[in-house]
Amino acid sequence: MRTAIYPGSFDPLTNGHLDLIYRAAKLFDHIIVAVAKNEGKKPLFSLEERLHLVQQSIADLPNVQADTFDTLLVDYADKQKSQAVIRGLRAVSDFEFEFQLALMNRKLNGRVETIFMMPKETYTFLSSRIVKEIARLGGNVESFVPPHVGLALSAKFGQPNGQT
């Protein structure tokens, strides 16, 4: 079985993330959306909240599951018997950092390949950081995140009835 890991902090999960998940689910037998603990980023949502939001978002994909990890990605990939790691590239500016990570992961474990995927053009500008800022300032994030994520953002920022 061909298994791929799609790691990230997913704080929060966006439609850009979902685009990659849906497309990767067609290419691999099994996808694990691996929510990273990474407390260094000071996430808005707890690890458990992020996991739950991802689980809700992928409920209709039978070959996709969500999990959390707090180890080296290549060690997690080994534990899950994964052959590949999926990384999203929105712009050229993402490439240098992602390329360095891929080379380091290859050095640590040459059995795990990194697959770079580009989102649909409509999502190239989208990031969790930007979505959080829009929501924090009371803007509408409806077209950037799944509905339940929009509601969760509204609740975090104290807006009534998901009116972000």
Image (cartoon, grey):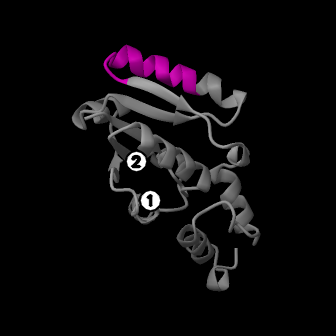
* Element assignment for label 2: strand
Task: Using the numbered discs, state the Cα–Cα distance from disc 1 to disc 2 in whole angstroms.
Answer: 8 Å
Q: Residue placed farthest to the bottom in the image?
A: 160
Q: Is residue 110 magenta?
A: yes
Judge whether residue 113 is colored magenta. Answer: no
Query: Which mark, residue 54?
Result: 1
Residue 61, given in percent of the width and then of the height, sits at 39, 56
Picture coordinates of residue 108 (x, y %)?
A: 35, 18
> Which quadrant of the view contains residue 25?
top left
Q: Quadrant of residue 7?
A: top left
Camera-nearest residue between 27 and 126: 27
Residue located 37% across and 33% down the image? 73
Relative to 53, say whether 97 is above or below.
above
Tell me the residue at 63%/85% (across/down). 161
Crowding near the residue tagged with mark 1, few <14, some 14–19, many ≥20 C-alpha atoms within 10 Å: many
In the depicted structure, whether residue 114 falls above or below residue 128: above
Residue 17 percent location from the top left of the image: 55, 49
Quadrant where the image shows the C terminus: bottom right
Q: Quick check: marks 1 and 2 in contact, CB under 8 Å?
A: yes
Residue at 46%, 34% in the rendered image: 86
Q: Nearer the viewer, residue 35 or 54?
A: 54
Q: Amino acid at mark 1?
A: Val
Mark 2, other Cα within 10 Å: few <14 / some 14–19 / many ≥20: many
Q: Whole-percent x and y of residue 138?
A: 75, 72
Q: Quadrant of residue 118?
A: top right
Is residue 110 shown left or right of residue 153? left
In the image, is 59 to the left or to the right of 120? left
Residue sitting at x 41%, y 32%: 85
| Quarter of the picture holding the N terminus | top left
Stretch of the chain drawn in magenta = 98-112
Q: Which residue is mark 2?
A: 33
